[in-house]
Image (cartoon, rainbow, N blue to C red):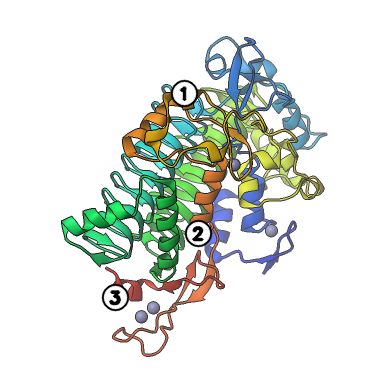
Amino acid sequence: MNSCIQCKADFVISEQDKQFYQKMDVPEPVLCMYCRREHLFVWRNQRNLYSRKCDKTGKQIISVFSPNSPYVVYDRDTWWGDGWDPLAYGQEFDFSKNFAEQYDALLHRVPMVGIFNGNCENSQYCNHVGEMKDCYLAFASWTSRKVLYGDNVWDDDTCADMLETASCSGCYELIQSTNCFNTKHSMNVERCNDSWFLFDCKDCTDCIACTNLRNKQYHIFNVPYSREEYGQKKQAHNLDTRSGIEQTKKQFQEMKKNAIHRFANLIKCEDSTGDNLVGAKNSHDCFTLRENIVDSAYCINGGSTMIDVYDGYGVGAQLERGYYCVDSGVQGGDLIFGVVVWGCQYAYYNYNCHACFEIIGCTGLRNKKYCILNKQYSQEEYEALKPRVIEHMRKTGEWGHPLPPLLSPFGHNETLAYEYTPRTKEECLALGFKWQDTLPGSFGKETKNPEDLPETISEIPDSIAKEILACKQCAKNYKIITQELQFYRSKNIPIPLFCPQCRYDARRALRNPHQLWRRQCMCNRAGHEHTGRCPIEFETTYSPNRPENVFCEACYRNEVV
Ligand SMILES: [Zn+2]
Ligand SMILES: [Zn+2]
Ligand SMILES: [Zn+2]
Ligand SMILES: [Zn+2]
């Protein structure tokens, strides 16, 4: 058993983990998986967008860097243009200093890109995204169109308020769902159409407030009706009014407590633990990854072929051998500590580098080879220097461990680290994290209060897009954009009373945490293979004190599929 140097908790390094660390030629970790996650996630400001000036053109831009950030920040297009040379900032490696100190100096000199938004069209308020079109406030997402307020969505079209969804269209408020059409306020659903408030349903159409259903139509609270009865009952729920939605939601939340909860959503997985996984093999502690995940662990969000990848967020797309990666782009390999390192090979301790080969401690590079601290060497020089730098970093105790969080350009409370491990400013500073005092957003500028917003969208005039609203929960100001108003009108959805962040937090609270507990199946139903309580144990995201009926795969299949 190892003891985490930050939180002091005991943690296990398995045989499989040891093999990975040997393969990567790195020492075993000294932080537990949650503290490692925190040290990596402070590098990812996913959702806090500021208005600030580009330091080259003076243009007003949307950026993940606050206006008072001590870094040089360029507008996205200027950064990606040819008007500057990252190698002009190159530093000689100084063997009398540790690596972090030298890299910190470089990070403060080389221009940062304002926002991480690649190959996108009309989606300037989206971050850590690629190939998005006409999207607004979508984060950590790919190849989607007309998505408003989406997090971790793939191939969604014309949807709003989505979390961890794929291939959905015309949907609203969905969590961990795929291939749905015109479905709202639902979670863990697949191929469902024209429905409301579903949990763990598949292939259902015209259903309201149902759980654990398969191939059903015209059901309400799991009770079947004729088409006519369904129409009448649906009308009585007043799902076009805020009060009707709230009331049905309350009844549904009660009903959901009695549903059967599968211990984990592992589809086509072998010898793997985690949740919301498709096609994982011999991988553990992984969450929300899809397609061909092999021999990987401690990763969240990504997929599409990843082999030997440990401690990552937003990783995959043919990544082999990656350790401590955030956003690895397409076809990466042999990465150690890479943040927004797209399509690089043999890259160690880099930030925001693209299509590079053999680089150490660089930032802002594109299509470069054999660079250390942004200084380019000949292949021979580099090959002589690389082992000396690694050896030096082993001696300083830096090699194979995440960089100190003080090097991150962001305050802990701006980043994903704060979502996963919320801490006070005092705690953050004591542990060596930074803190951002002024987060984006305003208070008290509202022209309309939540109580002034009518029950239905039909009562809302076009002028709402000119108003400033105040969130009912946190009082932060927010707006309804014209595209959003059109979406609500087409779907008959009332104006939300909460700001985008509070809505996102509410969705995150509904989905299970990215954490596993060992538990025993709660089933004691008759007619299963067991007599009395089922003895099967599993790793689940349901903590032991939760009230839901958490079943193993066999018992779940006996009852539901
Ligand atoms: Zn720890
Ligand atoms: Zn709010
Ligand atoms: Zn069982
Ligand atoms: Zn059972």
Q: Decide: is 239 above or below 93.
A: below
Ligand 4 is found in the corner quadrant, namely bottom left
Quadrant occupied by the N terminus: bottom right
Q: Which residue is mark 3?
A: 558
Crowding near pointer 1: few (<14 within 10 Å), some, many (20+)? few
Q: Residue at x 67, y 51 (%)?
A: 422
Q: Decide: is 243 above or below 437.
A: below
Amino acid carrying label 2: it is: Asn
Q: Residue at x 58, y 23 (%)?
A: 62
Circle 2: element type: loop
| Nearest the eye: 123 or 253 | 253
Looking at the image, is mark 1 or mark 2 earlier in the sequence? Answer: 1
Crowding near pointer 3: few (<14 within 10 Å), some, many (20+)? few
Q: Mark 3 and mark 1: span between their CA atoms?
A: 54 Å
Give the left or right position of residue 135, taking residue 191 as reference.
right
Circle 1: element type: helix
Relative image position of residue 421 (x, y in whole percent)? 65, 52
Relative image position of residue 424 (x, y in whole percent)? 75, 49
Q: Which numbered mark, 3 or 1, is in the foreground of this view?
A: 1
| Nearest the eye: 446 or 422 | 446
Q: Residue at x 52, y 44 (%)?
A: 503
Q: Mark 2 and mark 3: span between their CA atoms?
A: 23 Å
Q: Which residue is mark 1?
A: 463
Relative image position of residue 123 (x, y in whole percent)? 45, 25
Amino acid carrying label 1: it is: Ser
Relative image position of residue 148 (x, y in whole percent)? 43, 34
Crowding near pointer 2: few (<14 within 10 Å), some, many (20+)? some
Mark 2 Cβ inside 8 Å of ligand 3:
no
